[in-house]
Image (spheres, grey):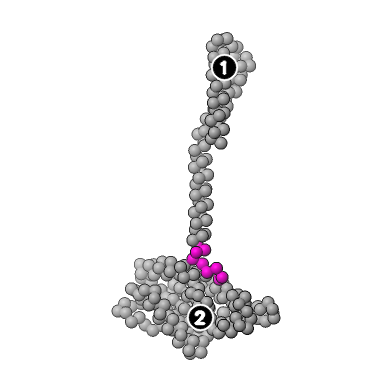
Amino acid sequence: MLLNLLNEWERSQTGLTQLQKRQAIDALDPASAPLQDAATLQQRLTQLLKQWAALPNRQAAEAHERIQSLEDELEQASQKLQEDPLTGALNRRGLDVAFARDMSRAERQHQPLSVALLDLDHFKRINDAYGHDLGDEVLRSLVQLTRRLMRPTDGIARMGGEEFMLLPDADANRAWGVIDRLLEAFCHQRVMHQGSGQRVAATFSAGIAQWCVGEDFAGLYQRADTALLAAKQAGRQRLMHAAPCTKSDKPHA
């Protein structure tokens, strides 16, 4: 477009110059056709100048739109890198980002932070009896139910297989209430097996640990995992609190 404007500018400017020379030589009548043509050319030149002046702004706007589009695409790609492709929950990369953010906020605002480590009970039996497609649907149904029952700020991540970690923005006692309601709802939920039409139920066990100031993720995970194992050994389909921090630091309250 810029080249077209330049070419048209040159043609119009040349035509106007030629007409001005004729007027000087021939003393043209103001009403004559050449001078009418000159007025037309002058008008066109004025229009071209306006277009020329607007061109940088338009190009800047187009560039801004393109940059915004690329930034949106980059944001979407970044989110995909932090998502588990099967369930849409956070993956381990996304969990690292979410935990670091929540830990920083909890420390800065002196607010509690807990994690709940969930593991589906007898999940292998579901896969063996009904196939992996139904097993996958059970995993997705847990994530969807969690997002309906919990707050948007309460993240859920798939650690691998049938193990998930939740990040309730609360102390251990309140987190217990949240996960207990989730367990009750999940136990009553059914997933349809397409082959037989049978409605399949599943349950989970969970260990809940409250973060201590100065505690790293590995230490927090270990405490939650130990509590989860205790829940499994106690009969499954239940929750267990983690042991208190062994550090000198105390949980944020």
Residue, x 52% and y 56% (percent of image)? 73
Instruction: List the residue tagged with mark 1.
Output: 19
Of residue 92 and residue 208, the one placed in the foreground of this image is 92
Residue, x 63% and y 81% (percent of image)? 130
The image quadrant where one finds the N terminus is top right
Picture layout, residue 27 above or below residue 101: above
Picture layout, residue 149 above or below residue 240: above
Residue 86 forms part of the magenta stretch: yes
120 relative to 169 in the view: left or right:
right
Instruction: List the residue tagged with mark 2.
Output: 119
Picture layout, residue 51 above or below residue 246: above
Query: From this viewpoint, is residue 48 visible?
Result: no
Mark with earlier residue (1, 2): 1
Q: Secondary structure at mark 2?
A: strand
Q: Sort mark 1 into few (<14), some (14-19) or many (20+) by Cα contacts within 10 Å.
A: some
Query: Which segment did they paint magenta?
Result: 79-87
The amino acid on which the numbered mark 1 sits, given as a three-letter code, is Leu
The image quadrant where one finds the C terminus is bottom left
Residue 183 at x, y percent in the picture = 53, 81
Residue, x 51% and y 67% (percent of image)? 83
Farthest residue to the right: give it.
196
Q: Sort mark 2 into few (<14), some (14-19) or many (20+) by Cα contacts within 10 Å.
A: many
Query: From this viewpoint, is residue 128 visible?
Result: yes
Residue 96 at x, y percent in the picture = 43, 69
Residue 223 at x, y percent in the picture = 40, 81
Residue 148 at x, y percent in the picture = 55, 72
100 relative to 162 in the view: left or right:
left
The amino acid on which the numbered mark 2 sits, given as a three-letter code, is Asp
Farthest residue to the top: give it.
26
Residue, x 54% and y 27% (percent of image)? 9
Toward which corner of the image does residue 221 lie, by quadrant? bottom left
